[in-house]
Image (cartoon, rainbow, N blue to C red):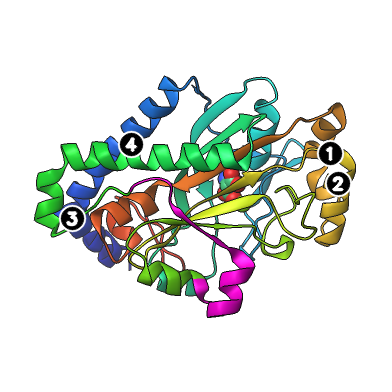
Amino acid sequence: METEIVSELMEHLSDKKLEAALKVNTTVRAAMGEFLRDRGFIEIPPVIFSTVTDPLNHPVYDPSFEYEGTRYALTKSMIFHKQIIVQKFPKIFTFSPNIRLEMPEKARTGRHLLEFTQLDLEVKGATREDLIKLGEELFIHTLEKVSEKHAQDLHDLGRRLSVPCAPFKRYKFEEVAEKYGSEFETILSKEAKEPFWIVDIPLKEREFYDRESDVFPGILNDMDLIYPEGYCEALSGGEREFDLDRIMERIRRKGQTYEQFKWFLEFAKEGLELSTGFGIGIERLVRYICGFERIEDVHPFPKVPGKVSV
Ligand code: ASP
Ligand code: MG
């Protein structure tokens, strides 16, 4: 088995598609970092394991280990670290490696890797509206840089990429779910020519940490950015719950335990202020830019759900 996997990997590493994707990846990261630094963001180092991590809203295997009597989990996202550090440093970002051991069926989607990187950012005192605007500007800036630098690479890949104009269209989750059914995201993504937002996601569809609207109970002040041409989810984010009682209530309503989040709750007891942020998957963005069917084509050492990988 090892021989086969290694020869498949050697072939993949020599693939022209991978070379183009890695060049695009280099520009994407540089463009995003430059955009954020120019706006006063500071870059923090990633957290790879921790006593507390994102619970996510879907089932995954849970890699954790014990060190000197304390249990640590591999990072699924830095959501809690973002919310904590932003209290001190009001504009932060990081390129965060995340481990999400998805079920093998997820390989079918072409957009799941067990190990990926997201550009994760957070802004203290900002609202969803502010972050939607920032997200649009960041996305446009990145696509402009890539189009400038990689016209030839994209041409060689047969990819025609257009830079969208802001503001992007917005859809309310419940309205499109009612109109198109549970597969609305895929349906709308396939129809769309430009990226668009899904906003006002119901509580049961997301983790406890996104803030519930004061005006519309059961609805979160959050958002997803969806790629056009069937590439589906690009980014998700939202305003964060900062009130300790509301955080505890939300954990309870999810059927989760305070024990699971005790390290975060200790910080929340000290007092948190509103922050808003989002995370955008880098491999998915590169896949979209390159127009690839499968996400593994953008990563030199892809971890595909259900497959043995080097
Ligand atoms: N990093 C978060 C996640 O992976 C996204 C966010 O900022 O809400 O869910
Ligand atoms: Mg989330």
**Which callout, 3 or 4, points to the residue nearer the camera?**
4
The answer to whether the beta carbon of the residue marked 2 is less than 8 Å from any atom of ligand 1 is no
Q: Is residue 124 left or right of residue 168?
A: right
The alpha-carbon separation of the residues under discs 2 and 4 comes to 37 Å
* Residue 17 image label: 3
The alpha-carbon separation of the residues under discs 1 and 3 comes to 47 Å
Closer-to-camera residue (148/255): 148
Q: Quadrant of the rendered structure where residue 156 is?
A: bottom left
**Which callout, 2 or 4, points to the residue nearer the camera?**
4
Mark 4 neighbour class, 10 Å CA radius: few under 14, some 14 to 19, many 20 or more: some
The amino acid beneath tag 4 is His
Q: Is residue 209 left or right of residue 235?
A: right
- What span is in magenta? 165-184
The residue wearing badge 2 is 246
The residue wearing badge 1 is 243
Locate residue 265, reporting x and y percent.
83, 38
Closer-to-camera residue (83/131): 131
Visible residue check, residue 116: yes
The residue wearing badge 4 is 141
Q: Earlier in the sequence, mark 1 or mark 3?
A: 3
